[in-house]
Image (cartoon, helix red, strand yellow):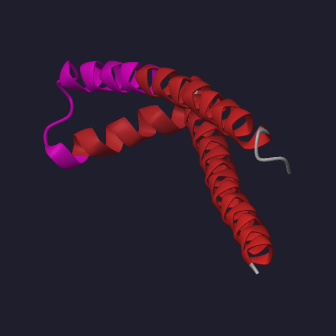
Amino acid sequence: MNLQIFPVTIADLERRLLKQNQAIRELKEEIEGCDFGFDAEIAFDETLKNDLQRKVRRRELAASNQDYQTLLLKFQKATAVARLIEIDLDLTKNQFAVAKLEARERIASVEEAVAC
């Protein structure tokens, strides 16, 4: 790959990662909104007498709410996509570093040949 292409490729990957992280933040906010709703419902349920009952009820609410489960799945997938983008970004940065070293080596070889 041409050295001039690396900065553009790196910037594109960083933009993709930024967008993905924004999507993750939005999903997290939606999940937190659902969590708040569950907590509010539990707080006003006078039949729940102790923490264990409240924890069990919260898990029941979360497990039975299909929208919540869908959000959790989307969050997991979005997080995995972000990690893959990070891996690609790291790989591209490392390839760029290697390409720069190889270019320096070629320059040094040419300078050495000219000096002899």
Image coordinates of residue 14 in percent, x first then y, are: 60, 34
Position of residue 44 relative to residue 54, above or below, is above
Position of residue 67 relative to residue 94, above or below, is above
SS majority, magenta: helix
- Magenta range: 30-52
Residue at 24% across / 44% down in the picture?
Answer: 53
Residue at 70% across / 31% down in the picture?
Answer: 12
**Residue 82 lies in quadrant:** top right
**Residue 34 lies in quadrant:** top left
Number of dots carrying numbers: 0
Is 21 or 14 nearer to us in this picture? 14
Instruction: Tell me the quarter of the image containing the C terminus.
Output: bottom right
- Does the magenta-highlighted stretch encompass residue 48? yes
Is 13 or 32 nearer to us in this picture? 13
Image coordinates of residue 74 in percent, x first then y, are: 63, 33
Is 44 or 90 nearer to us in this picture? 90
Image coordinates of residue 108 in percent, x first then y, are: 70, 70
Residue at 24% across / 39% down in the picture?
Answer: 54
Name the side, left or right, on which 44 lies relative to 115: left
Position of residue 79 relative to residue 70, above or below, is below
- Does the magenta-highlighted stretch encompass residue 49? yes
Name the side, left or right, on which 62 lies relative to 36: right
